[in-house]
Image (cartoon, rainbow, N blue to C red):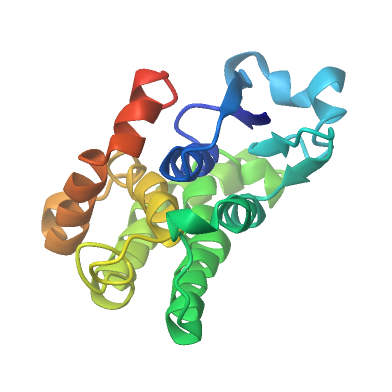
């Protein structure tokens, strides 16, 4: 059985949603950020980066990084159809995922993780103050270029959708008025209605 190390509200939840979509058995293990459990030796032995998600396989291999874990889930459960067979569509899916990882997630992290980039308190405050603007710019791009329909690839669900769902769940907390984004609003409603998201909520992961 797979073991998923996660923290509620973080991008690790995207992996849980994908696992639910793939109907794979797994054991969720919560990593408590409130007590800095991710910095303790026990967890660092699992993921030396001190972040979530991490996925333990049945043979005790540990995998990390959200995109890699999502691809792994799709690869071991091909019947779930989480990656399109068309190469162009698959590239569009990953283009969205890489944007979320390299740009939108980083913009969000500037609110609480400023110590990754600076040392002065004034720098932290400046980064935090910029988050509503940078996240709104990201939301603009999602609205205009990423969402091709109710899902990232139009009518077809893919790995990009749980990723986008979690990242967009941060928008309101980051000071972005989501009412200004009708495509994102519809997408979030579509995702919330999926059985996979309901299952993750029932497990207390969202």
Query: Going 37% across and 65% down the picture, which residue do you hit?
Result: 138
Query: The C terminus lies in which quarter of the figure?
Result: top left
Above or below for 41 versus 137: above
Closest to the observer: 5 or 50?
5
* Residue 49 placement: quadrant: top right
Query: Residue 201: x percent and y percent?
Result: 35, 25
Query: Going 63% across and 21% down the picture, which residue do you hit?
Result: 31
* Residue 196 placement: quadrant: top left
Is residue 130 visible to the viewer in this orientation of the structure?
no
Query: Residue 177: x percent and y percent?
Result: 19, 50
Query: The N terminus lies in which quarter of the figure?
Result: top right
Asked if residue 143 lies left or right of residue 108, the reply is left
Single out the residue that lies furthest toward the top. 35
Above or below for 76 versus 7: below
Above or below for 204 versus 183: above
Query: Residue 159: x percent and y percent?
Result: 46, 58
Single out the residue that lies furthest toward the front. 79
Query: Going 61% across and 58% down the picture, which residue do you hit?
Result: 75
Query: Residue 37: x percent and y percent?
Result: 71, 18
Is residue 132 visible to the viewer in this orientation of the structure?
yes
């Amino acid at each position: 059985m797979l073991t998923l190390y996660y923290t509620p509200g973080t991008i690790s939840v995207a992996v849980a949603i994908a696992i639910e979509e793939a109907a794979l058995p797994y054991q969720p293990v919560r990593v408590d950020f409130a007590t800095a459990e991710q910095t303790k030796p026990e967890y660092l032995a699992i993921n030396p980066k001190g972040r979530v998600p991490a996925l333990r396989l049945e043979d005790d291999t540990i995998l990390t990084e959200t995109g890699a874990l999502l691809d792994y889930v799709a690869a071991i459960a091909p019947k779930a159809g989480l990656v399109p067979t068309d190469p162009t569509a698959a590239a569009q899916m990953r283009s969205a995922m890489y944007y979320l990882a390299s740009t939108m997630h980083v913009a969000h992290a500037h609110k609480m993780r400023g110590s990754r980039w600076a040392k002065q308190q004034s720098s932290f405050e400046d980064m935090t103050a910029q988050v509503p603007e940078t996240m709104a710019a990201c939301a603009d791009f999602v609205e205009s270029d990423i969402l091709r329909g109710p899902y990232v690839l139009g009518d077809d669900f893919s790995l990009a959708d749980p990723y986008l769902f979690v990242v967009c769940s941060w928008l309101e907390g980051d000071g972005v008025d989501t009412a200004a984004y009708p495509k994102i609003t519809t997408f979030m409603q579509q995702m919330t209605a999926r059985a996979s998201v309901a299952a993750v909520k029932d497990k207390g992961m969202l």
